Image: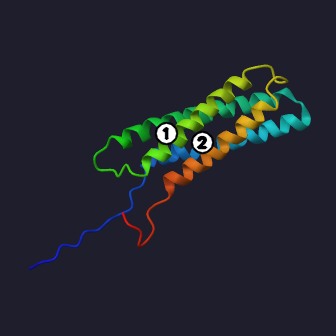
Amino acid sequence: MAATLERRYPRTIGALHAVLLAGTVPLFLGAVLADIAYAFTYEIQWSNFASWLIVGGLVFSGLALVLAIFDLFRGDRRARGLVPYLMILVTMWVFGFFNALMHARDAWASMPTGLVLSTIAVVLACVATWLAFRGPRAGAPA
């Protein structure tokens, strides 16, 4: 009687999904740093930089969100851990969108709310990236 050995490999996100998701962290982090620079110098160009970085972060996170929705409906993927990741990703995108609207206002009017929203967006981006890249631990149930 032959025994069959079943191998379980960690289910990770795809390469394009990983690149898009990992790109959101430096873009939103750059927006926070530009907002901090604006808060200290009052140079309007820093607010413009933050606005463009937020738009880049929204594009990357929006595409990562689309890929996460596709992964949710794939039959060969385990969707147990995907739902919290998807909820964090949607929340990050919504905060980023409202942050972009806040930065579309006059530079003086975007502070301090723009800085707070940028900080929330970068924290959510880090949490979403951590949730996406963590794999099952050795000895953990799959």
Tell me whether the residue at label 2 lies in contact with that at label 1, contact meaning CB atoms closer than 8 angstroms. yes
The mark that comes first in sequence, 2 or 1, is: 2
Q: Residue 2's image quarter?
A: bottom left
- Residue 90 locus on image (x, y percent): 53, 36
Q: Residue at x 70, y 44 (%)?
A: 29
- Residue 98 locus on image (x, y percent): 65, 27
- Residue 39 locus on image (x, y percent): 87, 35
Numbered mark located on residue 24 in the image: 2
What is the CA distance from the residue labelled 2 to the residue labelled 1? 9 Å
**Quadrant where the image shows the C terminus:** bottom left
Q: Which residue is mark 1?
A: 64
User: What element does badge 2 sit on?
Assistant: helix
Q: Residue 57's image quarter?
A: top right
Q: Residue furthest bottom?
A: 1
Categorize mark 2 by other alpha carbons within 10 Å: few (<14), some (14-19), many (20+).
many
User: What element does badge 1 sit on?
Assistant: helix
Q: Looking at numbered disc 2 in the image, what kind of residue is underneath it?
A: Thr
Numbered mark located on residue 74 in the image: none
- Residue 34 locus on image (x, y percent): 78, 37
Colouring mode (rainbow / by chain / secondary structure / one colour): rainbow
In the depicted structure, whether residue 70 falls above or below residue 101? below
- Front-most of residues 104 and 15: 104
Categorize mark 1 by other alpha carbons within 10 Å: few (<14), some (14-19), many (20+).
many
- Front-most of residues 120 and 43: 120
